[in-house]
Image (cartoon, rainbow, N blue to C red):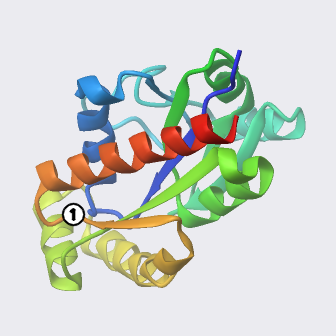
Amino acid sequence: MKQGKIFVISGPSGSGKTTIIEKLLENKSARNLRKTISFTTRPRRFGEKDGLDYDFLDHKEFERRVKSKEILEHTKFLDFYYGTSKKRLEEIIGKGKDAIMCLDTKGAFNLKKKFGKRCVLIFILPPSKNALKLRLNFRRREGSSELKKRLEIAKKELMQAGKFDYAIINDKLNSAVEETVFIISQSKKKRSSNV
């Protein structure tokens, strides 16, 4: 059986990457996609479900899984750790399905190093820095100090966009989803022609 591909969606907080993934998973054209569930040490937000949105772990358990190589790659973001489950990712692509995940730029580059051409990196850009700030203010999940940190991180992440395989401006959600579906279908055609 042919192994699936890995599609990594990255972008700054507020770019809409999580929403795009949700829409992709509802799209009939992308029915081969399976979302990977990451580990995190951050507290669960209202409405989030353990094992569905994330696997919520304490810091000690997260470190144990890193040491035992259950976590393929990990990063620290705003004092919390996030990591990719090696077992879940390998199960998805081993069954010939395509994995889709949301990672920061560091995690995206780490996976690209491990999987090469089987890993496709897609960066989601906001229409402008001002639009990004407005989106983050609208979410109102964090205080002003955390908002400031997110904007500082966003500036650094935006500078990495050119290193990705593709970049999409999320000005209109439906258009951004359609572009992502097109990229996924073209990447799968490349895989078929290389076999």
Question: Which of these two is toward me, 47 or 192?
Answer: 192
Q: In this view, does 179 lie above or below 22?
A: below
Please tell me how many numbered marks the rendered image carries.
1
Instruction: Residue 23: tell me if it is visible.
Output: yes
| Residue furthest right in the image | 68
Residue 174 x/y as whole percent:
13, 48
In the rendered image, which quarter is residue 127 located in?
bottom left
Q: Is residue 86 rendered to the left or right of residue 99?
A: right
Residue at (32, 43) in percent of width and height = 181
Callout 1: SS: loop
Residue at (71, 25) in percent of width and height = 90
Q: Which amino acid does label 1 sit on?
A: Asn
Residue 31 x/y as whole percent:
36, 22
Q: In this view, does 126 lie above or below 19?
A: below
Instruction: Residue 36: tell me if it is visible.
Output: no
Residue at the disc numbered 1: 170
In the rendered image, which quarter is residue 166 located in?
bottom left
Residue at (38, 72) in percent of width and height = 150
